[in-house]
Amino acid sequence: MAEELSLTFLGSGTSMGVPVIGCQCPVCQSSDVKDNRLRSSVLFQIGEINIVIDSGPDFRYQMLRSGISSLDGLVFTHEHKDHTAGMDDVRAFNFIQQKKVSVYADKRVEEVLRRDFHYAFAEIKYPGVPEIEIVRIENEPFEVAGTRLIPIQVMHHKLPVYGFRIGDISYVTDANYIAPKELKKLTGSKVLVLNALRKQKHISHFTLEQALEVIDMVKPERAYLTHISHQMGKHADISAELPPNVYLAYDGLKVSA
């Protein structure tokens, strides 16, 4: 029997999270826990294998909340701070696992990590800094702990960003355009996770309407919307507007395929 593949939403919010600091809007003041969104990140689990996509500013709390005590790979979609800022906290896994953490990144992301976390790459390291091994990725399938990942290159305005497919689950964040050849990689996904920032047009993210158009083209069994801003509206209100097989993701939600 094949091992179960699941995806857990560690965070489903946009770069500022929800609630936004100081905001008095109805979403930020909502008492519904599903309206509280940490920065976007997901945990793929295949049997005992744990693969995290992105380590934003909330990474430490996301790891504590998820209850995982081992990390087989940290994979980056792109270099923006809401996706990389928490990488320092992989050192907790260094202490637990007594080995380096494998970090998967393309050339551009690697350059940013080496700059922002320079102390982790120093010739003479201060005790206790993160111990990582960078594995360079490109737009070709690769393996993390024996698990095959298929990159999907999308555009975040003018910035190339990677989504990833594992088995029948595809995850795409920070996109406002997917080329036809990359869209084909999503075909056959039972579960598609796609960013939908808000209803109003945005320069670098799909709107709700645009995300639904992509979902209609891919035709997954189920689709989940993520990277959601407070401008989208309350979880309960937007959920009532969605097609039967499309759901608004929320922190802590676990889906399987």
Image: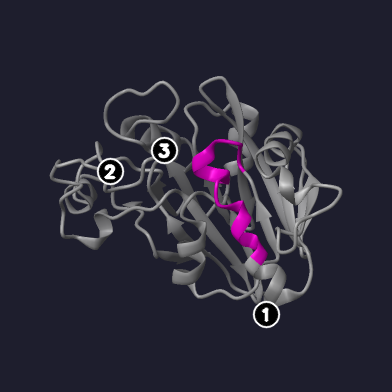
Disc 2 to disc 1: CB gap under 8 Å = no
Tag 3 secondary structure: helix
Residue at the outermost bottom position = 1
Q: Position of residue 203 (x, y in %)?
A: 41, 21
Query: Gap in Å between the C-alphas at discs 2 and 3?
Result: 31 Å
What colouring does the structure picture have? one colour
Residue type for callout 3 = Asp
What secondary structure prevails in the magenta region?
helix
Q: Position of residue 61 (x, y in %)?
A: 45, 63
Position above or below: 63 against 239: below
Badge 1 crowding class, 10 Å Cα cut-off, few under 14, some 14 to 19, many 20 or more, is few
Residue type for callout 2 = Val
The residue tagged 1 is 1
Image point (50%, 75%), residue name: 67
Query: Gap in Å between the C-alphas at discs 1 and 3?
Result: 31 Å
The residue tagged 3 is 216
What is the magenta range? Answer: 77-91
Tag 1 secondary structure: loop
Image point (71%, 68%), residue name: 94
Q: Which comes before the other along the chain, label 2 or label 3?
A: 2
Tag 2 secondary structure: loop
User: Any magenta on residue 252?
Assistant: no
Query: Gap in Å between the C-alphas at discs 2 and 1?
Result: 44 Å
Residue type for callout 1 = Met
Label 2 vs label 1, nearer the camera? 2
The residue tagged 2 is 20
Q: Position of residue 172 (x, y in %)?
A: 53, 42
Badge 3 crowding class, 10 Å Cα cut-off, few under 14, some 14 to 19, many 20 or more, is few
Q: Nearer the viewer, residue 182 or 53?
A: 53
Q: Could you say which quadrant of the image residue 227 lies in?
A: top left
Image point (41%, 31%), residue name: 206
